Image (cartoon, grey):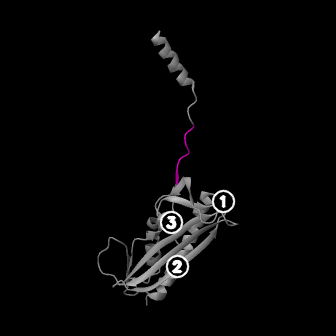
Amino acid sequence: MQLLAAALLAGCSLSLPLPAPEPAMTAALIDRLPANLPQAPRGAATLLVLSPQARPVYDTARMAYSLRPHHIAYYSRNEWAETPPQMLQPLLVRALESTGRFQAVLAPPHSGPYTHSLHAEVLELLQDFDRQPPVLRLVLHVQLADAAQRTIASREFVAQQPLVESSPDGGVRAANEAMAQVLREVASFVLEQVR
């Protein structure tokens, strides 16, 4: 009798529908360099691009958006492949190398000599749906210092790129456009300071 009950229960459990699989997590990159970076004659200067930082709310792979002022939420199925600072550092290095100005553009763990250092902080990387049309807002603060770590100049760069579509994918495309714009401006700023 118990064997018959077990067989019936096993048969019933096989006829139940299986739960639908959860949608996969999608990871995206900010990896676009600007096409028209400023150029300068090569000099003797070497630049160390320090590891960028980010405000804690943006120092995550989670992709942030806002529906109303002073509130931040994160997508549940879309994220960055790396944190914004991790994506930013190689872009800064490649952009500044492409200017032709520096003998070398270095990144940690470099421990040798250098003439200048650049520190960057992501203050905001947000898809803002409280505005019409919605925008991706990127705010980056950079500080250029000499070899003795004395600040030469600092500046905040702001880019607001309209979202072509109100979706995570639209935000990724806008983030790449905004980053390319900011990288071009950062390169110009650094070239103005390093003579």
Q: Amino acid at mark 3?
A: Asp
Report if residue 21 lies within the magenta region. yes
Q: Circle 1 — which element?
A: loop
Which residue in the structure is indicated by mark 2? Answer: 156
User: Which range is magenta?
Assistant: 20-26
Q: CA distance from mark 3 to mark 2?
A: 21 Å
Q: Is residue 163 part of the magenta span, yes or no? A: no
Q: Residue at x 60, y 64 (%)?
A: 127
- Amino acid carrying label 2: it is Glu
Residue 111 left/right relative to 152: left
Q: Nearer the viewer, residue 165 or 39?
A: 165
| 43 over 34 or under it: above or below | below
- The image shows residue 98 at horizontal and vertical percentages of 46, 77
Q: Nearer the viewer, mark 2 or mark 1?
A: 2
Tag 3–tag 2 contact (CB < 8 Å): no
Q: Which is more N-terminal, label 1 or label 3?
A: 3
Cα distance, mark 3 to mark 1?
A: 21 Å
Residue type at mark 1? Ser
Look at 59% across and 61% down and name the residue there: 65
Can you name the residue that lies furthest to the top here? 1
Residue contact between numbered discs 2 and 1, judged by CB atoms under 8 Å? no
Sequence-first tag of 3 and 2: 3
Of mark 2 and mark 1, the one earlier in the sequence is 2
- Which residue in the rendered view is the most extreme toward the right? 132
Viewed as shown, does residue 61 lie left or right of 164?
A: left
Q: Which residue sits furthest bottom?
A: 195
Residue identifier under label 1 = 166
To which residue does mark 3 refer?
31
Q: Which mark is residue 84?
A: none
| SS of the residue under disc 2 | strand
Nearer the viewer's eye, disc 3 or disc 2? 2
